[in-house]
Image (cartoon, rainbow, N blue to C red):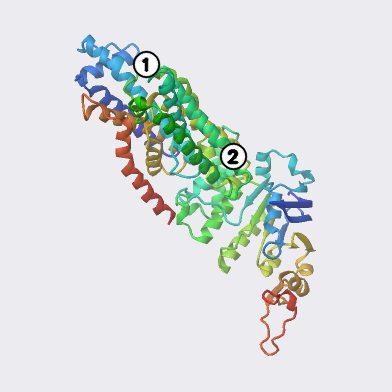
Amino acid sequence: MRKPGALVVAAAVLVAAALVAAFVGAADLNPLATAAALVDKAVPFARLPSSLGPVDRAVLFQIRLPRVVLGALVGGLLALAGAGYQGVFRNPLVDSGMLGASAGAGLGATLAIVYLGGAGPETVPVAAFAGSLAGVAVAYGTGAAAARHTVLGDGVATLLLAGIAVGSFLTAVQTFVLQRSASDIQAVYSWLLGSLSAASWQQVTTIAPYAAVSSVVILLHGRHLDVLAVGDEEARALGMRPGLVRGIVVAASALAAASAVAVSGLIGFVGIVIPHVARRLAGPSYTSVLPLSLLGGGAFLVLADTLARTVLAPAELPIGVVTALVGAPAFVWVLRGTSQVST
Amino acid sequence: MTALAAEGVTVALDRAPVLHGVSCAVPGGGWLALLGPNGAGKSTLIRAMAGLVRYTGTVTIDQADTRALRPRERGRMLAYVPQEPVLPPDLTVTQYVMLGRTPHLGYLAVPGRHDRTRAMAAMERLDVARFAERRLARLSGGERQRVVLARALAAEPAVLLLDEPTSMLDVGHEQQVLELVDGLRREAGLTVVSTLHDLTVAGQYADSLVLLDAGRVVAAGSPATVLTAPLIEAVYAARVRVIAGDDGHPVIAPVRRGERDGRLVRPGDLPGSTP
């Protein structure tokens, strides 16, 4: 890793974002007392007296903290998955929702809400998770099959186009299902726009294993993604198996994005914007872009969620709206930066 | 020193045959140049040697079939430099040269001090260490070619496979790069196989030549036996004169069609003369 400094800064920003998110909210918690309570709880053998009352303690540990931790997990996973896809497809504009992932999750969640009895906390995450993975599997399978007969070079473009086609198909099915069941539109849309308002420790522990496995696998492939940057043929001449690396990283990125989507709904732009910022800070090597994206994505989403639940308090903005409002202008900035690089 | 040989190599790309049973060999420490007009199959032969296209026939390294090698083993033996290498614009020279260490690293290995030392040695050997932290997008054509060679050298290969290593360079940088390759061959005992488009230059640097036409070997041997006017005129549909240079190497000079007679020597072979 070339720039450990950037990593330390990103970790510090994440911790700071988490602290701010813990202090701010509907119940006004005293920052000093909150910090003392957190240290008392988190650091073994530390005994810090805190003036936080039992209600404030419950707010902190049962409502706010799981939401902060879940937000950090979801943001980190989305940014890491986006960076993984970008390395695999050698394209900085690919998002974690590409390859049918978002469309599949949307269809899964819609089916669960419409046919399995409402936006329950059990069925919808499982359906979204399964739908997201199935979407990627179908897109990757058809894309890889088509790439064998392709005229588009080494097949990367074919895979992306297959992802777009599969995504459009799944979205069409989802829209049709929704149109037949108007009473569920509100529930489906509030899921589609993304929210962390249902965050609980149970959700954190549910996705933690998938998050851990997928993150570790992606982080271990930074060097391989750097080699892929010189193209499949030169990568093969260097003794690498591009198809194998691509398959592993796509599978891990799909798992990361699916576990995030399952507990948060569709949150856009994190997967594009954060890796790009990481690239600007630490250069193009994926050995630094990947860990920076994980930390930066976590920090970004924790802050976005804090905005989402405070700007219109006591009402909440959908977090997908917040990330899009910040993300869309940033996306334009990404496009400008990209055209400068290529000229 | 490592010898390389191709035996009856046949390649079809998109079902169209490109090479028909091509055989050629280069002894350890030798320089074999592949010549021939555009589309003759030179690049395909080099890519077959590197194991990058499906072929029938055999490619051997010191009599051992390269098909028996694992991909990383082959990557350590053979360094391949394509005609137009992909240079990620934002990568630094050091990061790019370090990619050459890939065949030496296990799947989950992280490059260590030894790898950095070997990469640095390759960069110093090719005189690119001065701009080690510069981005690839900021390099001139000659610098770029040296950086690409440094990446190939960082793998510590026995054989260099170079596809048109000088096609983008002016005559001065062309000589500089070829002298560098020749120096590597003499000092490190590297075996070199390259395609070269300039026939005179090929005769100066390579010690054996193979002339390909339409996927078949038309002539093979020393520069003096391959670089003859009748062979070149027949294969390239060109008009040339072969002059003995001061150093004994043949010099191939193109000859313009005479304006007085206006008659072609080989009318059927010239582009535009066929109906």
Tell me: A153 left or right of A74.
Answer: right
Instruction: Write down the residue under mark 1.
Output: A201
Which of the 4 image quarters holds residue A41?
top left
Q: Are marks 1 and 2 in contact (CB under 8 Å)?
A: no
Q: Note whether residue B138 is visible.
A: yes
Task: Give neighbour class at mark 1: few <14, some 14-19, many 20+ (Cα, 10 Å).
Answer: some
Which of the 4 image quarters holds residue A311?
top left
Disc sitting over residue A144 in the figure: 2
* Residue placed furthest toward the top: A54
Tell me: A277 left or right of A313.
Answer: right
Question: Gap between marks 1 and 2, in whole Å?
Answer: 39 Å
Residue A341 in percent (x, y) is at 42, 52
Of residue A237 and residue A316, the one placed in the foreground of this image is A316
The residue marked by circle 2 belongs to what chain?
Answer: A
Q: Earlier in the sequence, mark 1 or mark 2?
A: 2
Instruction: Give the number of callouts.
Output: 2
The amino acid at mark 1 is: Trp
Of residue A124 and residue A286, the one placed in the foreground of this image is A124
Position of the C terminus of chain B by quadrant: bottom right
* Residue placed furthest toward the front: A180
Of marks 1 and 2, the one in the foreground: 2
State the SS at label 2: helix
